Amino acid sequence: MPIDHGHRLDAAQLPTPSALLRAFLETDHPDPTPHRVLDAARGLAHCHDRRRRILEQARDPAATSRGVAACGRLVDDIDNDRVALITRIDVWVATYVEHRDGASLHTETLGAVIDRMAAKWIAAHHSLAAHTTTTPPQREARTHLQWCRLAELTDGYRDLITDVTEHRRRLPVW
């Protein structure tokens, strides 16, 4: 089973859910870590935060068509950065994670799983600070839903890395 020793992880150890969530949290104040997966996870959270802000600008009723087009190009650039970070995680998995024949194959790469978690982390945090036209009960329900979804993804990640570590499941390697 993966062990969480604070911020320091061995190169071949899968990050625990808590280490991963800490990496997402550190997007504003990065604390460089020697673990490539956590560095990439931090970068994915930063990409999703930038993407959310740019999409908000594009949706602004005062946005010009030129501004919306510029936002679209920025989103494309951010998505290319995300692909590079996801690939960095998947290459790390191919290099450092033992793949046992006969173990059940997971449907997504670890990079794709972490990208979804980073997106939900940003959505959940944004829901806490969102100033919307919805009423407080609607806002609370939306915020609760975002955090529940993040918790579900985190539980799924924990189950996945436990199964991979115990050779019951293997990750796709491209």
Image: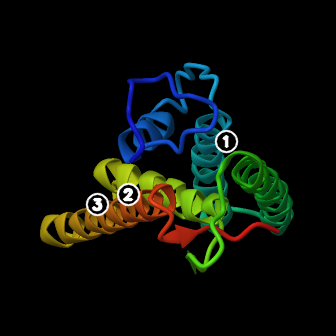
Where is residue 155, by image quadrant? Answer: bottom left
Question: Could you tell me which secondary element the residue under label 2 belongs to?
Answer: helix
Q: On the image, numbered disc 2 is attached to which residue?
A: 158
Q: Is residue 26 above or below residue 106?
A: above
Position of 70 with respect to 55 (left or right) is right
Q: Label 2 amino acid?
A: Arg
Percent x, y of residue 147:
28, 60
- Most extreme residue toward the left is 137
Q: Residue at x 63, y 41 (%)?
A: 37
Where is residue 5, by image quadrant? Answer: top left
Local crowd size for mark 2, using a 10 Å CA cut-off: few (<14), some (14–19), many (≥20) = some
Q: Label 3 amino acid?
A: Trp
C-alpha gap between disc 3 and disc 1: 22 Å
Local crowd size for mark 3, using a 10 Å CA cut-off: few (<14), some (14–19), many (≥20) = some
- Most extreme residue toward the front is 101
Q: Residue at x 55, y 33 (%)?
A: 27
- In-front residue for pair 6/98: 98
C-alpha gap between disc 3 and disc 2: 16 Å
Q: On the image, numbered disc 3 is attached to which residue?
A: 147
- In-front residue for pair 24/68: 24
The mark closer to the camera, 3 or 2, is 2
- The mark nearer the N terminus, 2 or 1, is 1
**Image quarter hosting the C terminus:** bottom right
Q: Residue at x 56, y 75 (%)?
A: 103
Question: Could you tell me which secondary element the residue under label 1 belongs to?
Answer: helix
| Color theme of the render | rainbow
- The mark nearer the N terminus, 3 or 2, is 3
Q: Label 1 amino acid?
A: Ala
Instruction: Kindly identify which numbered label has been placed on residue 40.
Output: 1
Asked if residue 162 shows in the view, the reply is: yes
- The mark nearer the N terminus, 3 or 1, is 1
Instruction: Kindly identify which numbered label has been placed on residue 152.
Output: none
